[in-house]
């Protein structure tokens, strides 16, 4: 079988997944459990097959998520036996544009300075506009910029009750 045939089978499988309801996963899992128990399936081949499917899903889901029109998901969007909705993800901070040499130096050092680094990050997060501070060693005035807060949007999928 060539790559084109394999791709076609995979695409058909993905399209058929749209009709699945939550209870179908238990039925399918039970089928595989029984086949493995009876020896009808090779456990190693089955493991490899599912790991390949897992890798495919891990590879493509972020790309697909980037193309979802999240305005459609501001309220629960129902389709194919599921509801989708966006939810704010965990915030992250970008300190690279702050211009803070103390933070830069602390982030390059060993674990014993991690508490100092966390303390400095809290300070940088509290800055809301460019702020002048004096370098304690040289007395030079440095302008610190606010850290940039980034928050991703997660797409949450909930299965309809069967």
Image (cartoon, rainbow, N blue to C red):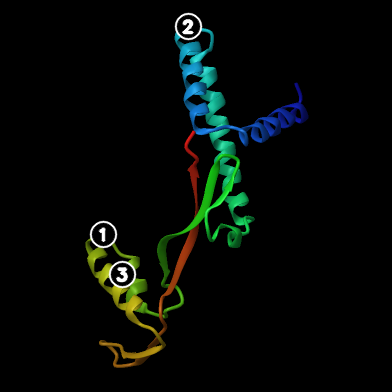
As helix, strand or loop, the secondary structure at mark 2 comes to: helix
Please name whichever residue, 10 or 107, is drawn nearer the observer in this view of the structure.
10
Q: Along the polypeptide, which appears first: circle 2 or circle 3? A: 2
Name the residue that disc number 3 marks: 106
Residue at 53% in and 20% down: 46
As helix, strand or loop, the secondary structure at mark 3 comes to: helix
Residue at 49% in and 7% down: 39
Q: Position of residue 153 (x, y in %)?
A: 50, 60
Q: Is residue 79 above or below residue 142?
A: above
Residue at 42% in and 79% down: 98
Q: Which callout, 2 or 3, points to the residue nearer the camera?
A: 2
> Which quadrant: the N terminus?
top right
Disc count in the image? 3
Q: Along the polypeptide, which appears first: circle 1 or circle 3? A: 3
- Measure the C-alpha gap from mark 2 to mark 1: 52 Å
Q: Is residue 94 above or below residue 69?
A: below
- Measure the C-alpha gap from mark 1 to mark 3: 9 Å
Q: Is residue 117 above or below residue 157?
A: below
Q: Position of residue 99 (x, y in %)?
A: 42, 80
Name the residue that disc number 1 marks: 111
Name the residue that disc number 2 marks: 38
Q: Are marks 2 and 3 in contact (CB under 8 Å)?
A: no
């Amino acid at each position: 079988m060539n790559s084109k045939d394999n791709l076609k089978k995979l695409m058909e499988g993905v399209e058929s997944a749209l009709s699945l309801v939550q209870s179908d996963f238990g039925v399918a899992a039970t089928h595989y459990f029984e086949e493995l128990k009876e020896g009808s399936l090779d456990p190693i081949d089955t493991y490899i097959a599912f790991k390949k499917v897992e890798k495919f899903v891990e590879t493509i889901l972020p790309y697909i998520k980037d193309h979802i029109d999240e305005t459609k998901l501001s309220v629960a969007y129902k389709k194919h036996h599921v509801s989708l909705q966006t939810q704010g993800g965990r915030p992250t901070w970008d300190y690279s544009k702050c211009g803070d040499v103390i933070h830069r130096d602390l982030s390059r050092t060993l674990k014993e300075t991690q508490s100092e680094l966390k303390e400095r990050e809290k300070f940088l997060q509290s800055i809301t506009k460019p702020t002048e501070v004096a370098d304690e060693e040289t007395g030079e005035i440095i302008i610190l910029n606010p850290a940039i807060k980034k928050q991703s949007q997660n797409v949450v999928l909930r299965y309809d009750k069967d």
